[in-house]
Every structure is written in C-alpha cells, then in structure tokens.
Amino acid sequence: MSSERILWYFADPMCSWCWGFTPVIGAIKEGYSDRLKIALMLGGLRPGTTEPVTPKFREEILHHWRDVQRMTGQPFAFEGALPEGFVYDTEPASRAVIAVAGIDPAAIFPYFKSVQAAFYTEGRDVTRAGTLADLAAQHNIDMPRFLERFESGEVRDMTRTHFRLTREAGVRGFPTIVLQAGSGHKLLTNGCRPLAELRPELDAWLAETA
C-alpha cells in the first residue's frame, strides 16, 4: 500500500562496516518491526571481481577491519584472513542471501548475519557455493534446493537488480539506511553510526509520518 513505511537497509555481507553495524540493525529490527517494514537491499560492494587480493590491498582491507573493530567492538579473525589467491568477489554472498530469501523470507536477516560472521570471525571463504550452502543448512534450508536456486538464472537476475536499484537510489557506500513513507524518502544514515544517534531521528520520522 502506498502509505506503508519501509526502512531500506542497503548493505553487503562482505562489507566490514556493515558487520560493525550488525548490532545496530539488529536492535532496530527488534525495536521497530511492529511499526515499519524493514527490508534488505543487497548493494554490491565488489561484484564480479576476478583479480586475487594483492598484499598491499590486503593490508588496506585489514586496516579498515581494525578501524571497525576499534569503533564498534565487533569481533574479527585477522590471522589468516584474505589468504593469497583470495578473490574478493562479493556477488556470490549477495546472491546466496537472495536465494535464501526466496526459500524462507524470515531467514534473510539471520542468514545475512551468518555469512558475515563466517567471513569475519571464522575466516571462511564465503565466495564458495559449498560454504554458502553449509551456512544455509544451519537455517534449516535444504542444501540441494539452496544450490539449485543459487545457480539459477532467476536469482542471478534478481541479484543484478538489487545492485542496479542500489545505484539508481544514489547509494554509494554501505551501510546506508533510507526511510520511505509513500513516495517520500529520507536518508537516515550513510555509514556506521551508533543506535543512540539514530534512534531520535528514526523516532522523529515515525512521528512525522504517522
């Protein structure tokens, strides 16, 4: 319906600042799901990357991870992270989230978080179909069914649509939250911010659009 209020969460499961933001979006889901729809939009951080991570790029990424850990307290496994030959392609992980959503819509946020945790705290290669299927099984999703959807043209197209809609919305960084009420839109945050800062702004928007 046109008056429905939606919180659009633009994120990528292999975005370190999104991992840092995980407790915040979790608290928002817990505290606000009864007042607005909360929807995940897969933004596409580095989709289609084919070149392995270079030592220099690895150090740059780990520097960002340390910043995220310092700012948010989220856990990271640094030792052995991003090993030689690792290709930082974020498309498969995003596609897996969309595949899961098509099987069990209620699992989309829990599965997204599982992929994040596997990558950042366990050093698992979440660009691999087998890893992603194993994580889906932890959410009671049949692995063959997951893999069939994961490899399907339909889910590949849906993933590209998520990336395209993100670009068309003008979103260039993650995490980003856009609030929608009818045809009106409001940017809540572009970047990782604490709940204490976001809650008053979200409450004010809800009061304005009531």
Image (tube, rainbow, N blue to C red):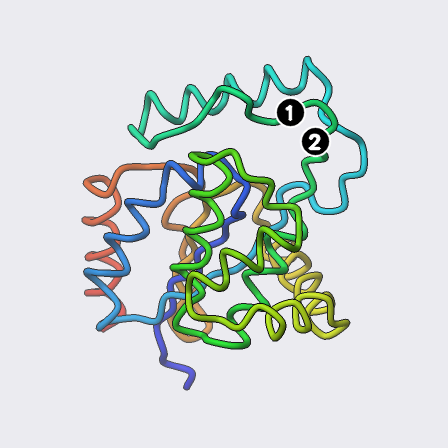
Q: What residue type is labelled 1?
A: Pro
Helix, strand or loop at mark 1: loop
Which residue is outermost to the right?
50
Residue beneath the point at 72% across and 35% down: 87
Mark 1 surroundings within 10 Å by alpha-carbon count, few (fewer than 14), some (14 through 19), many (20 or more): some
Quarter holding the C terminus is: bottom left
| Residue designated by label 1 | 83
Mark 2 — residue? Answer: 86
Q: Which amino acid does label 2 sit on?
A: Phe
The quadrant in which residue 76 appears is: top left
User: Distance from label 1 to label 2 (Cα)?
Assistant: 6 Å
Q: Nearer the viewer, residue 132 or 46?
A: 132
Where residue 102 appears, as percent x and y from the top left, is 55, 76
Q: In this view, does 79 lie above or below 194?
A: above
On the rendered structure, is 151 left or right of 116? right
Place of residue 176 in the rendered image (x, y in percent of width and height, measured from the top left): 46, 47
- Counting other residues with Cα less than 10 Å from the Cα at mark 2, is it few (<14), some (14-19), or many (20 or more)? some
Please state the horizontal and vertical placement of residue 9, each as a whole percent of the image. 44, 56
Residue depicted at x 29% and y 44%: 23
